[in-house]
Amino acid sequence: MSLCQHRWEMDDVQFGFVAFERCFHCNGLRTFFSLEPTPVIGDEYREGQCYWSRAENAQSFRFGLRCSRCGERQTFDELMGLLFCTGCDAECKVDELRRQHETAGSWVLVAFGFMDREKRASVPEAKLEALADYFNQRRDPSRKQVRLVSYELIGDFSRCEGDFLHDVGMLSLQPPPPRRPTFESRAADIPDQETADDDPKPR
């Protein structure tokens, strides 16, 4: 066990897409990370008895974490995305944890692995802890902290109404441009007093 008090930094970032494919023969679903420059919805191909069709693309990125103090590295190739628990099922273990940690001032996020048909990759606990540390090291200690748990704690995913933290339909491999602050945007829409007085007014 490492004695280093890790200070994690993100490295080896690759922008791409989470691809969702479905087979109309077995009704299987699988997901994977793609670096395609122009992913095509509806692209079809056969693989054995399966007929796979691209159903959806979601802009995402793949990354690793590296400790700036000791050089230890964690990769997250099996991580598809994170889901925010909305407390939709009081009997769900994730919701039970959400309620417990909310009292202590923490958010619970669920880590989902990529799927191969109906089998989903698991993200090891050590990696979840490292990723949670990375998030929390950059947050004000007075604000809510982040706790990551595995999707395997969700009892019945068909009833889950949690929100995935990804953007569907964004098809650029470049990171999005920075947003203008809300107040700056509003100020730009307010006419200057001098020009406002020059506007023609009905008589």
Image (spheres, rainbow, N blue to C red):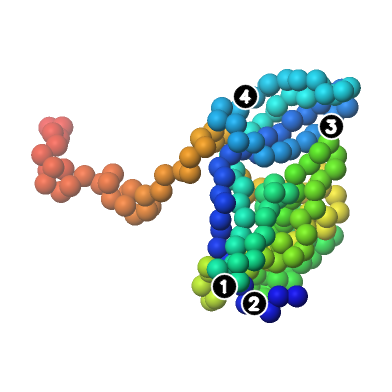
Residue found at x 14% / y 37%? 199
Most foreground residue, 189 or 55: 55
Choose the circle earlier in sequence order: 3 or 1. 3
Residue at the spot of label 4: 40
Compute the Cα span from label 4 to label 1: 42 Å
Compute the Cα span from label 1 to label 2: 8 Å
> Is residue 103 depicted above or below 107 in this figure?
below
Is residue 44 at least partly visible in the picture? yes
Residue found at x 48% / y 44%? 175
Residue at the spot of label 3: 28
Q: Are marks 3 and 1 in contact (CB under 8 Å)?
A: no
Compute the Cα span from label 2 to label 4: 45 Å
Residue type at tag 3: Gly
Q: If the image is split into quadrants, where does the C terminus sit? A: top left
Residue type at tag 1: Arg
Residue found at x 74% / y 24%? 53
- Of helix, strand and loop, which one carries label 4? loop
Compute the Cα span from label 3 to label 4: 19 Å
Residue type at tag 4: Val
Choose the circle earlier in sequence order: 4 or 1. 4
Residue at the spot of label 2: 4
Residue at the spot of label 1: 69
